[in-house]
Amino acid sequence: MEAGLKTDKHDAVLDLAAMKLPTGEHTIAFYGRAVSKYAAPTKSGKSGKKKDIVDIVVSEPITIRVLPAAKK
């Protein structure tokens, strides 16, 4: 799933049944990446030539608990 940076909020929906996770605790994390321009300062203090850099951000781990399916 990709989410743009121009909005304030995004929801992540995990289909645990499709993932077929066994009952118990599991740890997940989300990561994101962005390409931005960066110019290192030169010896004269001015900005040098701009180049693309990639920033990667990883969320804090999130623990989820999968319970057994309710009996019908």
Image (spheres, grey):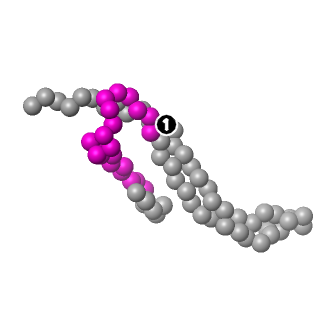
Asked whether 64 or 37 is in front, the reply is 64
Q: Is residue 13 magenta?
A: yes
Residue at image location 63% in from the left, 60% down from the top: 54
Q: Secondary structure at mark 1?
A: loop
Residue 23 figure quarter? top left
Asked whether 10 or 68 is in front, the reply is 68
State which quarter of the image contains the N terminus: bottom left
- The x, y position of residue 67, in whole percent, is 27, 29
- The x, y position of residue 24, in whole percent, is 35, 27
Q: Is residue 17 above or below residue 54?
A: above
Residue at image location 85% in from the left, 65% down from the top: 42
Label 1 belongs to which residue? Answer: 61
Q: Is residue 50 magenta?
A: no
Give the left or right position of residue 72, taking residue 15 as reference: left
- The x, y position of residue 57, in whole percent, is 56, 49
- The x, y position of residue 13, in whole percent, is 33, 48
Asked whether 24 or 53 is in front, the reply is 24
Residue at image location 52% in from the left, 53% down from the top: 32
Magenta range: 8-28
Give the left or right position of residue 27, taking residue 38 as reference: left
Give the left or right position of residue 56, taking residue 3 as reference: right
Q: Is residue 17 above or below residue 48?
A: above
Q: Is residue 23 above or below residue 4?
A: above
